[in-house]
Image: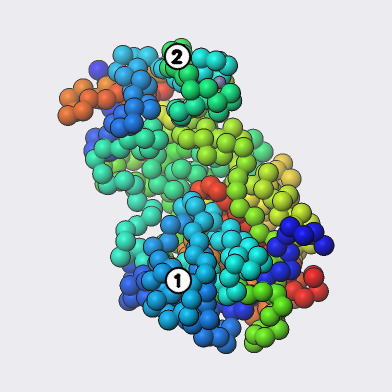
Amino acid sequence: MKERTLRGKVAVAGVGETAYYKRGQAPDAEFKLALKSIKAACADAGISPKELDGFASFSNDRSDPSRLAAALGCSELRFSNMQWGGGGGGGAAAVGNAAAAIATGTADCVVVFRALAQGQFGRFGQGSQSNVVSGSFAHTIPYGLMSPAQMFAMKVVRFMHDHGVEQNALRSISLAAYHHAQHNPRAVMYGRPLDEDTYDNSRWIVEPFHLYDCCLENDGAAAMVLVSAERAEEFPHKPCYLLGAVGGSHYRAGASVHNTPEYASSTFPSLAPHLYDMAEVTAGDVDVLQCYENFTGGVLMSMVEHGFCEPDECNEFFVKERFLAPGGDLPLNTSGGNLAECYMHGLGLIIESIRQIRGDSTSQVANSEVSMTISGPMVTPVSSCIFGGETTL
Amino acid sequence: MNPPYLNSGLPQPLPAPDGLDAAFWQGLTDEKILLQSCCDCNKWQWGPEWICHHCHSEALTFTEVAPEGIIYSYERVWHPVHPALKDQGPYLIVLVEIPIADHVRLVGNLLGDPHQDVIIGSQVQAVFEHHETEQHPFTLLQWQTIN
Ligand SMILES: [Zn+2]
C-alpha cells in the first residue's frame, strides 16, 4: 500500500442532520442547528460529543470551532479547519481535511459539519443589493450577471453546444432526484413528485435551466463523525471507510471574469484522476453516485470529467432509468440531493453516500461497496471523495 | 443616444480601490477597449492581475484592441434576481472572446431583440454605453452582431 494516502485509514463513526426546512423557516438559530446536527451524528455513533477533538467545515461556515467545542464541552480541541471557497465545492475536501488530521495523528475524533440558516443571514440566490460594485464583480453584475444560476449557465450553454447535448439530458437528472425524494421522508420534496410534462412546462430561470434544474434553498445542518479505521468496528453501523478524497481545480480555473481557459467544465479534469489513483478504483467500480447539483448542468460536466461518460455521448447516457435505485446501473442522487432532499451545500450528499455503504438509505442500492460523492462544480476549488465497505480494503 | 440595454437601478461599477482595473474603465469612457498585456513576454490576461501569469513579470500595461470579438458563449436570463429587473423581461448576456488578445473574454449584453437566436462563433462589434448623469459616471461595454 502507498504510504502517502488516505485510503482505508479513516472510518465513519456516525452521521446526523437536523430536520430540513424551507429557506428562512428554521425555528432555531444557525449555531443551534450546527449543535443539533453534531449531537445527532454523535448519537448515531453512540459517543458523547465531549469526545470530539476536531472540527472541519467549508463554504465559510459561520459556526466557529472554538465556540462549538465550548458549547459541547469537548475535553480538548486539536484540529479546526476551514476549506477555502464558497458554495458546495469544498464538501468532500472538508472530509479529506478531517481524514488527513486523523491519519496523521493530529486529532482522533473529527466532525465534519455544515449549518445554514438563510433567514438569519441572508439569501444566496439573490443579486447584490448594494448600489455600487468594484473588483471582478464590476465586470459582470452591471450586465445583469449576478446569481449563481447566471454565473454557471454560460458554461453549460458552451458545453451543450460543443457536444450537442439536448435538454432531456438535464431533465433526466432532475427526474431521478425527485423520484428518490419520494422515498425519503426527510426530503423537502417528499410527497411532491415530478414528471416529464411538469418539467417541460416549468418556467425558465436562465436557459438552459428550468425551475426544476435549480437546487432548493434550505435551512438546517448536517454532520458526520470520522475516526481512525482501527476503531471502525466499535460503532453501531456497518463499517464505512474513506477510500480517497481530493480538492482542487484545473489550470487557472480561478481566472476572473469567466476567463478559465478550459471554460465549459466543472473544473475536475486534472483532479478526478488523483481521486481514482488514491482510492484504487475506476469509474466502472462505482456502485452509486451522489453528484452535486446546484444546477443540473453541473452534473453533466462533473460526471464526464470523472469518466462516467464521453462528452459526446451524453444524450445516450443521461437517461432517467439508468439513474434510478435500485435497478439502474448507476443510481444517482438517491436521497433526492440538492434538488429535492435539501440544499445543505452538498453535505447531505456525502451523508447519503455513507448511508449507501451502511445499507440504510431510503433508496438502497443492493451490495453497494463503492460509493462516490462529487462536491460542487461551480465555486473553485471543487472536490470529490469515495467511501467503501469492508470488502474494498 | 440609445437608452441603456437594462433598466436602471442595478449596482454601478466603480474602479477597484487598489487601481488594478482603473485603466480599463477609463478606456471605456474614451470609447477604447484597453486590456492587460505583459511588456516582457507579450502575453495577454483578463481579468487584470498584478503579475503576468506566464512569465511572472510585474511590467504589465493596458493595450488597446479593436472593438470587435467573437461570441464564445451566452445566456438568456428570464428570472429577475434584482428588483431593478422586475419588469425587464428576458435579456441576453454574452461572453465575447478577443482572438488577437490570446482569446481573453469579456462579459456584456447582446443588444437587440432579447429573443433573437444567438450563434456561438459569430462576430460582434463593441458598443460603448455611457452613463454620464450618474454621480460616478461610467461606461459599459456592450455588443451587437455584425450583419
Ligand atoms: Zn509575461
Residue A351 position by quadrant: bottom right
**Figure quadrant of the C terminus of chain A:** bottom right
Residue A271: % across, % down: 67, 48
Report whether residue A387 is seen. no
**Figure quadrant of the N terminus of chain A:** bottom right
Kindly identify which numbered label has been placed on residue A153. Answer: none
Q: Are marks 2 and 1 in contact (CB under 8 Å)?
A: no
Residue B21 position by quadrant: top left
Is A180 displayed left or right of B142 in the figure?
Answer: right
Residue at (27% x, 25% y) in the render: B138
Q: Secondary structure at mark 2?
A: strand
The residue that mark 2 highlights is B63
Residue A329: % across, % down: 75, 64
Is A333 displayed left or right of B140 in the figure?
Answer: right
* Residue type, label 1: Ala
Question: Badge 1, how many Cα within 10 Å: few under 14, some, many 20+?
Answer: many
Depth order, front residue of B147/B126:
B126
Is B20 displayed left or right of A371 in the figure?
Answer: left
Residue A63: % across, % down: 40, 67
Kindly identify which numbered label has been placed on residue A221. Answer: 1
- Which quadrant does ligand 1 occupy? top right
Residue at (65% x, 65% y) in the render: A104
Residue at (64% x, 72% y) in the render: A354
